[in-house]
């Protein structure tokens, strides 16, 4: 084994351990904010919101939003907006303190009820800790080992980000595939192997804080072929919902990112609107897990699912418009699950189909996530690990994810051919009568 390989292997193990610490810290901070905001001590965010008063539901996201907006204003006026993707690509140096502070502010705003994903915060914090750890390791071993290359550091930071995501949701395969396919866009054995090791270690380290299991009733394996055909049929719906979600979020994000004092009242107003909506639909605040829970538990009516389908992405877009930042994975999942629930109730009512609501909701969610992340393998694995269904449903989720991804690719190719300029006629063609 070469010196650089030994140092890289040590850095991989250290990155996985530190990513697990980042995941545990993020979840602990989120839970602390949730319990303080909604004054409860045990259970899920949905339980806390459901037991709180209407006044607290309305004011908790507004106060949390104002505090987070103040923090972002102070942070951005001095350091700008931290960018993990630009840092990993080597376009910007690692801003350790600003990126960690930005992650803490994301945990604050999401914990208080913002309709944003919580996965960006642990990704940033894991990358920061990994950068510190690998730098320390390099200094410690500089006299006896080689040094890590720029490519090695890019792999380690990407895998740290994926492991941080895997840690907060207890999805080791999902975190690994996020690092390899979404962050790096490759199936290279070195990247995939590093991602699997770091994500598995991170999930194991954070397990005492993040572990959560659900005991759900799933359809029988004998129905697998029916659900596989249904996954093909639901793919066009997932494409429509996923593309609409992407378009809405792209339009909502301000360019350039807001850095003025407007952040304070803006994020507070978004929180107030979310809080008022939560008086009627307590599933709306938070990263989207509450929507997934009620969809999987089949606790929604057709009207309620339709309301969540419309309001969840709109509230997420509102937070982006006023300058807040956060993840898009779970809001997209929640939107897809709500769309699948609406479609299932409609089919069951119109055609007397008796379709299994949780399975169809998650199948549609996998298809939507494949569109928003452009990574069908990650989408299928992430949804499957998140819900703990039978193994055979992984095939159904994969069919939905890859079918949706394929439809999108065909659509993009068709649009490219339509926009392509017509070739100029040759001299021989011009001479023809």
Image (cartoon, rainbow, N blue to C red):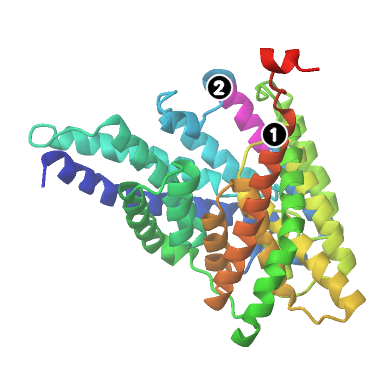
Residue 135's spot in the image, x, y percent?
26, 34
Residue drawn at x 59%, y 42% is: 106
Instruction: Give the quarter of the image for residue 279.
Output: bottom right
Q: Main secondary structure of the magenta part?
A: helix
Residue 72 is inside the magenta segment: yes
Q: CA distance from mark 1 to mark 2?
A: 40 Å
Mark closest to the chain's N terminus, 1 or 2: 2
Residue drawn at x 52%, y 55% is: 378
In the image, farthest residue toward the left: 144
Q: Is residue 239 above or below residue 233?
A: above
Residue 252's spot in the image, x, y percent?
75, 34
From this viewpoint, is residue 281 visible? Answer: yes
From this viewpoint, is residue 301 visible? Answer: no
Front one among 408 and 277: 408
Mark 2, secondary structure of its residue: loop
Residue 37's spot in the image, x, y percent?
68, 53
Which residue matches tag 1?
Answer: 417
Decide: few, some or many residues near mark 1? Use Cα within 10 Å; few <14, some 14-19, many ≥20: few
Question: The C terminus is located in which quarter?
Answer: top right
Residue 428 is inside the magenta segment: no
Q: Is residue 171 above or below residue 389?
A: above
Closest to the camera, between mark 1 and mark 2, is: 1
Identify the magenta region.
67-76
Which residue matches tag 2?
Answer: 80
Label total for image? 2
Residue drawn at x 56%, y 61% is: 380
Front one among 14 and 181: 181
């Amino acid at each position: 084994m070469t010196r650089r390989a030994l140092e890289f292997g040590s850095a991989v193990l250290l990155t996985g351990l530190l990513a697990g610490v980042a995941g545990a810290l993020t979840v602990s901070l989120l839970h602390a904010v949730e319990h303080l905001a909604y004054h409860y001590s045990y259970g899920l965010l949905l339980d806390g919101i459901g037991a709180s008063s209407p006044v607290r539901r309305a004011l908790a996201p507004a106060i949390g939003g104002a505090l987070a907006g103040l923090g972002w204003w102070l942070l951005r006026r001095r350091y700008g907006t931290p960018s993990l993707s630009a840092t990993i690509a080597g376009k910007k140096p690692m801003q350790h303190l600003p990126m960690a502070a930005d992650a803490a502010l994301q945990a604050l705003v999401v914990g208080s009820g913002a309709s944003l994903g919580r996965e960006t915060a642990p990704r940033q914090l894991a990358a920061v800790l990994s950068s510190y750890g690998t730098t320390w390791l390099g200094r410690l071993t500089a006299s006896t080992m080689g040094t890590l290359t720029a490519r090695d550091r890019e792999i380690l930071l990407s895998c740290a980000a994926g492991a941080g995501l895997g840690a907060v949701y207890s999805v080791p395969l999902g975190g690994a595939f996020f690092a390899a396919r979404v962050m790096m866009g490759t199936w290279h054995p070195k990247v995939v192997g590093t991602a699997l090791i770091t994500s598995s270690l991170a999930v194991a380290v954070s397990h005492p804080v993040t572990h959560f299991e659900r005991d759900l009733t799933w359809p029988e394996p004998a129905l697998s072929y029916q659900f596989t055909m249904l996954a093909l049929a639901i793919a066009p719906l997932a494409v429509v919902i996923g593309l609409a979600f992407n378009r809405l979020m792209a339009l909502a994000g301000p360019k350039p990112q807001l850095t003025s004092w407007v952040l304070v009242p803006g994020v507070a107003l978004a929180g107030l609107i979310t809080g008022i909506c939560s008086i009627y639909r307590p599933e709306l605040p938070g990263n989207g897990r509450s929507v997934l829970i009620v969809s999987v538990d089949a606790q929604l009516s057709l009207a309620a699912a339709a309301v969540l389908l419309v309001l969840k992405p709109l509230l997420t877009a509102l937070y982006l418009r006023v300058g807040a930042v956060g993840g898009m994975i779970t809001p997209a999942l929640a939107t897809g699950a709500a769309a699948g629930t609406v479609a299932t109730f409609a089919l069951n009512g119109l055609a007397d189909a008796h379709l299994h609501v949780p399975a169809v909701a998650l199948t549609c969610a996998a298809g939507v996530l494949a569109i928003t992340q452009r990574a069908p393998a990650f989408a299928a694995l992430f949804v499957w690990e998140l819900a703990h269904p039978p193994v055979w449903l992984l095939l159904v989720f994969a069919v939905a994810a890859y079918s949706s991804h394929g439809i999108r690719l065909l659509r993009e190719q068709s649009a490219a051919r339509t926009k392509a300029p017509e070739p100029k006629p040759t001299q021989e063609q011009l001479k023809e009568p």
